[in-house]
Amino acid sequence: MLGQMRGFWKEQNQLRRERIQAEVEAARARQAEVHAYWNRHKTTVTQRWANRTTGRGQAMVADIPEVAAQWHPDNSAQPEDVSATADRRKGPYLWQCPLGLGHEPWPATPKDRVRSGAGCPACRQLTRLADIPTLADQYRGPVPVSDMNYASHERVPWICRTWAVDPGTGSWQPVEHCFEAVVKDRALQADACRVCAGYVVDDTNSLRTWFPEIADELDDPDADACRMPTSRHNVSRRQAAGEESGGVYATLPWRCRHGHGWEATILNRVQGGGCPACSLSGISKEQVRLVAELAGLMDLVPPGPPDPRLPDGLPDFSSHQLVVPLQHKPEHWRYKAVEVDAVFQLAAGIRVGVEYDGAFHHSTKRRDRRQYESEKGQVLVAAGLLDLLVHVRLRDLPLLETAQALAVPVPERSTVYQQACAAAAAIEARFPGSVPGIDAYLTDGHPRRQDQADAYILALWGELRPPRRRPARTQPRCPRPLKETIPRQDSLLTPASAPYRNPDRPAEILRDYRCACGNPRQFTAVQAQVTSGNTKSCGCLQRQAKRQRRASLSGAETRAVREWARQQGIDVGTSGRVPDRVTASWRLHRAGRLDVLAADGLLDERRVQQWTQTDGVHLGARGRVTSGAWLAYAEHCLGPDDSHVAAVRQPVRTVVQESLFELSRPDSSRIRSGPLTL
């Protein structure tokens, strides 16, 4: 969702940049036309003054028609009475812009207008921020937008109205981005919203909003997660050049809920980086079970401070980080810390390391680690950190032939008990008497410390076994075989072809049928629908059912049923035909047969369906109770003596059933006589 929102903001910013550039270009083009007009005006006026025929003091403003046309009517004198060389001693006069751009009149002396060819001062600074509608709509500065120059160096506030995603619900909602920027940068460089671009952080794109669990682990009281980005990685050039940067990455202090502290960048945290002390990288559940079992035979050396995630009294079965001195570290090794799965302290001060080598990480198919594993045992023994490194290697991994490393091969399907027995026996053979109680353990036949291993796995992983992954399908699904099935017993359709697949839907099997209604054309249908009974004809039964006339009800009875339904709280509307189920329920309620009505005052559909099966009444598609069945059941419950029912009696058996019976006979004359009627 965060990437989708950023992509939307980027797209909107690009559209705004294009609009700003187009509006600035249009404003500059208009300004160029205005400047060209006043340049022509200056040339014309100065030439007319230079080519005058009268004396210098005798020329009037009216003698220069281009200037006289701009004389403002509020002046006390007329152009014919004012000298063209009048200066400030006689006072300036008002002039009006001839371009009709809405400029206010300006004061100027006739001498400046005639001899210098001066024009409208507002036209010389024509383009304002108001001429750029995209920026004018976002401008929130103290100076009116009509007075703000579009190339001003002033830093002013802006507001960008856009849409943002709510991380909690995933829905889009309108927001306002508030930021400050220089007017010139926004107009001439077409800079768009700084919040949308990621330069300014607010509640829509902050670390606190999108990653609250990461913000809670921030261990800097001066850092505000509500104003921190979600993707900063490198520091700025100014910070990198200073002494306080400490490098090229903007690392921040973090602290997990278990009290572990470390430093990392925001981008590292957002991309999934967590606490290195709580990380399960390099630890497997099989390794934990083997180390826990061996810890019952030998003294396990704790890997470090107690892990706060573990319950009290539970040993720590995580890996050890052994730091190799520089004089013993090979030059081609990248790190000086070596990871060992477990370290045990034996009698006489012997320290033994145990490695669990699985086939996935230690086979030569992925990477050949034999040289590193051989050097690992040699370096640790030479540095005095271990006396022996034992490798419990599964399956057919290549053996390690070094004096400082001991390879113990075990089958791939071996149990934890079998692996522990093999490792303990190998250590006892190398150092006799160093593993007390090994004989009793070998004859015991079952593991002893798996309850501690389960408790450790639950504390760190939260589950004993990972969820089983379904293997990826390498081959396409095998299509379902084509099998002929017969139509339902009461169907009018007879197969006319073999089944075949639908070319548009390969999983759907079609078949051609002929209908017993006399239709000469074949009918194509889904074979499964015909077999189940959802499709029984070519459509003739449906057309005949639509032509069947429903029982007519009087207006008085309809009003009585509607009033009764309103009293019972049954919604039947205010107009139109009342549902036959409600009408049948009203008749039974009126006759006092409340024993057949449900708690809501209506007939139970299951009761009516059971009655239709025993009495042979026809049901609709998929067992739906038809309108005639509701009324027929009410008639059945009331009996033939009811005077009201006698007037609205409906036939129970429909013509459809009789037609089906007749159509089942090959010599039926009804097929030849025409379509069925209901």
Image (tube, rainbow, N blue to C red):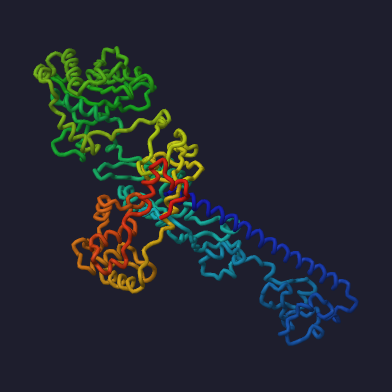
At 79% across and 79% down in the image, what residue appears?
68
Above or below, 535 relative to 82: above
Is any part of residue 244 visible from this angle? no
The residue closer to the viewer here, 667 or 389, is 667
- Residue 149 image position (x, y, % from top left): 60, 65
Location of residue 153 (image quadrant): bottom right
Please identify the quadrant where the C terminus is shown.
bottom left
The residue closer to the viewer here, 431 or 538, is 538
- Residue 317 image position (x, y, % from top left): 21, 31
At 25% across and 59% down in the image, what residue appears?
636
Is any part of residue 98 visible from this angle? yes
Instruction: Identify the residue at the far right of this view.
Output: 53
At 26% across and 69% down in the image, what residue appears?
643
Above or below, 584 relative to 372: below
Above or below, 353 relative to 564: above
At 25% across and 23% down in the image, what residue appears?
355
Number of disc labels: 0
- Residue 604 image position (x, y, % from top left): 25, 58
- Residue 328 image position (x, y, % from top left): 31, 21
Instruction: Identify the residue at the far bottom of this view.
Output: 76
Location of residue 332 (image quadrant): top left
Location of residue 84 (image quadrant): bottom right
Above or below, 518 relative to 280: below
The residue closer to the viewer here, 513 or 264, is 513
